[in-house]
Image: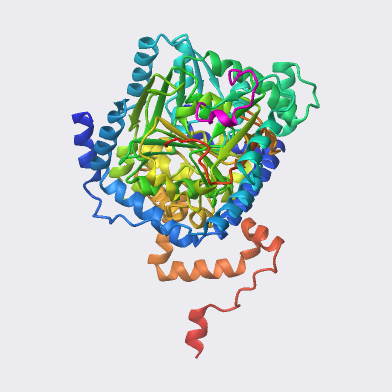
């Protein structure tokens, strides 16, 4: 801080009394099943879709179903080899679909947490976005942000890109993906590792 | 945008004469008013508002400590921190960055502070092209206007206005649907994102403890602006800090609920520094802490409370006066109730003009404010300041001085009271009152007369 600034700041704040720092409201607590159900409901309410994979095999089948008929896809480096579709990899700005792996998901706000280490263009530039999330990483409260201590950037995605700036009418896919699907794994094995 | 609140009366008269802004603004603000109500109802909202008020009060009373802490945390992950005491200093810092990184093209995410600092004309004067990437802000830029609302810059524009504007700009059909218009803007802006050298954003919060910059939005333009260009510049007011990482979650959701009635914006970016080992992201992140009158607000024994403001726009949506004209009448970057209370302390009473009077003091703004800014009390303080600084209107001075005389002189007081009882129907504002209600029926005798007859 510049010294001239500091001197003015001290003078300006001199009249303010001591104010204590309050604790945040208690975070929402839910069982894992309740958290998953609430996440699915809230994510859908803000325009996303949710799919639940019954098994590892089903998870792979669902990924392939999303890739059906596409010339190529953009793929997160965090996606395990066993789940990768056998399609040409395209840069996110050319791909019709991007596949990401979430660090976690939050039920109360219906939010996917996406770490920048898989690439931010991947999360933003394709018209459709498929995001894998491990069932055990679906948490109740946004207070999970307290645990985020590393990484250059974390994106919180709670639905498709949308705007109501044109006459108050909602439009999706304005800048980012118009379609976003959260694919929740069966949870026995992590789909991949990422840190916030 | 230059600060010209003095012309408020003329501008509002002009805006009220036209139908469009009024209808469009009323529709948009009432929609957001109701979605906010629903979103507040899901929480023990009074507890949340008191917590948020408390955190901001604590922050403001320890601002030096938290600014120092924020500077250390940001610097630790490679963010370069700058300080600007005035708009000129902030623009000079931007000019240095433009030249250092040889910037030709800038994309911007919506930032009220950048409007306050008049960043766009400044960058254009340096030969840099600037594109606003928020759809509403882009509409406003194409129309050669300024934002009329903190959250919805184009709230004053109807679909037909935007259809006509885009037909001219992009050759879209005159009756094009909103998604066709959005697609036209998307393709122009997508190109701009990929070619830009620098992205400029504001910040909803900077967490002092962890040096995290938080940005809330719905379109994804902020995420792309802060990710695709090789340099990211954050413009942030010194009051935008949060003390702890654990304050982030409640403040993010409270802001979204207050602004648009969402539990969270569809996109939130939490930025900690340049890309490091990531596949993409900016190579350099600069953050400019801006004063530009905020310390003057902090020093003010009444108006310092406005520094709690989260810029959610809830008070604009709740205000029956704002709703009639939209933000352009106010002639300043911050409009509506919050603008009317910030203006006298930041700009002085002379420049703030009639803004503290642009309110019926109904109190709706204070009821919805997520950080409990006592706006009606501050509007009164602004009026008081105008009187003390000799800026009251001749009419107000005359009425108050006549009232003072009458209250000091019993004969004059009695005569005045009798005149009011007899002449009530001659008073035009009482006629306006009685148009929708039963007529006023004052007692034929005054209290004093009744008392003496006892």
Give the percent coordinates (x, y) of residue A122.
55, 25
Residue B439 percent coordinates (x, y): 68, 68
Report x, y in % for residue B260.
Answer: 58, 45
Q: Nearer the viewer, residue B19 or B444?
A: B19
A41, above or below B11, in the image: below
Across the whole image, how many numbered discs are drawn on residues? 0
Q: Report whether residue B413 is seen.
A: yes
- What residue is at 39 percent from the left and 51 percent from the top? B381
B48 and B18: which is toward the camera: B48
Which span of residues is magenta-colored? A77-93
Q: Is residue B229 above or below residue B34?
A: above
Q: Position of residue A140 (x, y in %)?
A: 50, 53
Q: Is residue B105 above or below residue A115?
A: above
Which secondary structure class fits the magenta region best?
Answer: loop
* Residue A84 located within the stretch drawn in magenta: yes
Q: Residue at x 47, y 14 (%)?
A: B197
Q: Nearer the viewer, residue B115 or B48?
A: B48
Residue B140's image quarter?
Answer: top right
| Residue B443 quadrant | bottom right
Q: Residue furthest bottom?
A: B454
Among the 4 quarters of the image, the one containing residue B66: top left
The answer to whether B48 is drawn above or below residue B207 in the figure is below
């Amino acid at each position: 801080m510049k010294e001239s600034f500091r001197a003015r700041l001290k003078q300006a704040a001199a009249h303010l009394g001591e104010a204590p720092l309050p604790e945040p409201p208690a975070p929402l607590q839910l069982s894992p099943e309740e958290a998953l159900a609430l996440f699915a409901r809230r994510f859908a309410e803000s325009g996303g879709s949710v799919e639940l994979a019954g098994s590892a095999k089903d998870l792979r089948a669902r990924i392939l179903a999303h890739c059906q008929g596409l010339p190529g896809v953009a793929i997160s480096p965090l996606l395990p080899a066993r789940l990768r579709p056998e399609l040409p990899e395209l840069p996110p700005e050319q791909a019709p679909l991007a596949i990401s792996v979430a660090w976690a998901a939050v039920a109360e706000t219906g939010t996917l947490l996406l770490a920048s280490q898989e690439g931010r263009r991947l999360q933003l530039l394709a018209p459709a976005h498929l995001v894998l999330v491990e069932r055990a990483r679906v948490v109740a409260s946004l207070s999970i942000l307290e645990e985020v201590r590393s990484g250059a950037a974390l994106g919180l995605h709670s639905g498709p890109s949308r705007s109501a700036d044109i006459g108050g009418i909602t439009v999706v896919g304005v800048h980012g993906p118009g379609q976003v699907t959260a694919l929740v794994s069966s949870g026995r094995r992590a789909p991949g590792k990422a840190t916030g | 945008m230059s600060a010209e609140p003095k012309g408020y009366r003329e501008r509002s008269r002009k805006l009220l004469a036209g139908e469009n802004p009024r209808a469009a603004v009323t529709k948009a603000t009432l929609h957001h008013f109701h979605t906010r109500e629903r979103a507040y109802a899901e929480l023990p909202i009074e507890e949340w508002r008191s917590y948020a008020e408390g955190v901001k009060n604590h922050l403001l009373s320890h601002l030096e400590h938290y600014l120092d802490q924020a500077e250390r945390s940001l610097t630790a992950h490679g963010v370069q921190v700058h300080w600007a005491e005035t708009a000129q200093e902030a623009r000079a810092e931007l000019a240095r960055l433009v030249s250092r990184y040889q910037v030709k093209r800038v994309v911007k995410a919506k930032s009220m502070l950048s409007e306050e600092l008049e960043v766009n004309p400044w960058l254009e004067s340096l030969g840099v092209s600037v594109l606003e990437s928020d759809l509403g802000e882009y509409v406003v830029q194409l129309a050669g206007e300024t934002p009329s609302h903190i959250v919805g810059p184009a709230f004053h524009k109807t679909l037909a206005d935007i259809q006509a504007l885009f037909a001219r700009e992009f050759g879209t059909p005159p009756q094009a649907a909103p998604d066709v218009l959005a697609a036209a803007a998307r393709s122009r802006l997508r190109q701009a994102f990929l070619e830009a050298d620098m992205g400029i954003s504001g910040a909803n919060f900077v967490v002092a403890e962890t040096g995290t910059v938080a940005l809330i939005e719905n379109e994804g333009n902020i995420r792309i602006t802060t990710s695709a260009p090789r340099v990211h510049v954050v413009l942030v007011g010194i009051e935008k800090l949060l003390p702890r990482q654990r304050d982030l979650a409640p403040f993010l959701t409270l802001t979204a609920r207050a602004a648009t009635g969402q539990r969270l914006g569809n996109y939130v970016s939490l930025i900690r520094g340049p890309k490091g080992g990531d596949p993409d992201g900016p190579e350099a992140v600069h953050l400019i802490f801006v004063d530009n009158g905020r310390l003057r607000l902090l020093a003010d024994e009444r108006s310092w409370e406005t520094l709690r403001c989260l810029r959610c726009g809830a008070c604009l949506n709740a205000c029956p006066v704002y709703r009639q004209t939209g933000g352009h009448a106010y002639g300043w970057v911050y409009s509506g109730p919050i603008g009317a209370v910030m203006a006298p302390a930041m700009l002085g009473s002379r420049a703030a003009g009639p803004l503290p009077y642009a309110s019926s003091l109904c109190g709706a703004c204070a009821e919805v404010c997520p950080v409990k800014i006592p706006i009606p009390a501050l509007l009164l303080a602004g009026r008081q300041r105008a009187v003390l600084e000799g800026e009251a209107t001749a009419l107000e001075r005359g009425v108050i001085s006549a009232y003072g005389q009458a209250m000091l002189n019993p004969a004059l007081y009695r005569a005045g009271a009798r005149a009011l009882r007899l002449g009530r129907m001659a008073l035009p504002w009482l006629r306006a009152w009685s148009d929708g209600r039963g007529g006023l029926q004052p007692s034929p005798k005054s209290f004093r007369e009744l008392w003496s007859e006892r």
